[in-house]
Image (tube, rainbow, N blue to C red):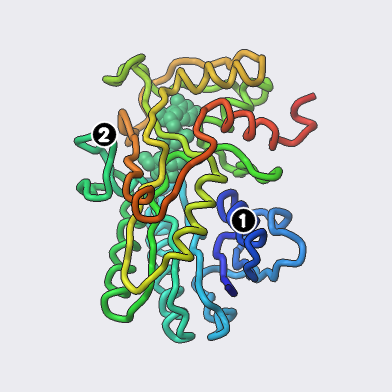
Amino acid sequence: MKLLVTGGAGYIGSVVVGHLLADGHEVTVLDDLSTGHRDAVAPGVEFAELPIAEAAAVLTPAFDGVLHFAAKSLVGESVAQPQRYWANNVGGTLALLEAMRAAGVGRLVFSSSAAVYGEPDRQPIKETAPTRPTNPYGATKLAVDLMISSYAAAHGLAATSLRYFNVAGSWRGLGERHRTETHLIPLALRAALGQGEGLTLYGEDYPTRDGTCVRDYIHVADLASAHLLALSASAPGHRVYNLGNGDGFTVREVLAAIEGVTGRPVPAALGPRRPGDPAALVASSERIRDELGWRPTRTTLREMITDAWSAMPTAEHA
Ligand code: UFG
């Protein structure tokens, strides 16, 4: 298929582009490089340095579909600067959907998020759980899911929203490289290297087995394979799938696994809770397993952390 990948210069988008190319698809990447990296786009892939609001400039009837990753995705920033999230994530996606409609491109895979569920009553979280986002980032992802549903109903869009839990690991050297890093695993790896001021552990008074938050980590390559399945299974309508391993690990368990993989201590100072952090987020991915036959293959923390560690610039290991 001929595909447009928005956000294809970012961490997850670039890994999915690699998988699409390996599967024989023709890919154009659209990315404004606000957080992505030009060198994460494989050589030979057509590249448009544009915001999603300008997708109409590249989207022609020759395209078969769009994979939409481009978004602002920092929870804390979304609380302080919500306008950026509504403008980019919601306004930008509306422009993208209109460009798709104008060009007659009817297939979409969208990067949604576990953040749409907020503080869930029950674990593991199913797609039928109430959606009560606790921050503007999650609210904008939910708004886009609703927008897509209405486009599918009215205009016959064939769409899939994938609600990611905590993505980790790397694939062929493509790992997490955020200029502003807030995620646990890359920050803890940097702390293990003695970079920065060490890690702050955000609270250990949660109602979990060791008092730290529980999260469901999914390998970025397993996430990528779900996108390919969603793309080939697409039919008119809007399907929603959670994507995680169904197994939760505490922050302390992640830090212990990092010490095991790197052979280095992870200096961590106990701090207060981070506002908006739910105690536990564990996915039920039964639906995508049953309907699309998705099977994650790299489910251990050790595999994810080993791959995240190996993708850090080699100079940093010295
Ligand atoms: N944590 C720390 N110290 C840090 C960073 C994180 O203790 O320096 C803890 C957090 O409090 C949390 C866990 O590590 O308990 C994981 O935090 P991340 O920031 O790595 O990931 P989140 O679970 O907060 O975020 C993920 C996705 C978001 C999504 C969110 C849904 O990355 O995009 O789940 O709640 F919005």
Q: Quadrant of residue 316?
A: top right
* Label number found at residue 123: 2
Q: Quadrant of ligand 1?
A: top left
Q: Going 44% across and 49% down the picture, which residue do you hit?
A: 294
Q: Is residue 111 left or right of residue 260?
A: left
Within 8 Å of ligand 1, the CB of disc 2?
Answer: no
Tell me how far mark 2 sits from mark 1, CA to CA: 31 Å
Looking at the rendering, in which quadrant would you find the C terminus?
top right
* Label number found at residue 19: 1
x, y percent for residue 63: 55, 79
Instruction: From this view, report whether residue 124 is shown above or below residue 33.
Output: above
Q: Identity of the amino acid at label 1?
A: His
Q: Is residue 3 left or right of residue 201?
A: right
Q: Going 22% across and 50% down the picture, which residue do you hit?
A: 128
x, y percent for residue 194: 67, 20
Q: Is residue 289 left or right of residue 226?
A: left
x, y percent for residue 247: 39, 30
Q: How many numbered marks have been drawn onto this rendered protein structure?
A: 2
Q: Is residue 296 left or right of residue 160?
A: right
Residue 232 visible at all: yes
- Between discs 2 and 1, the one toward the N terminus: 1
User: Marks 2 and 1: which is nearer the front?
Assistant: 1
Q: Identity of the amino acid at label 2?
A: Gln
Looking at the rendering, in which quadrant would you find the N terminus?
bottom right
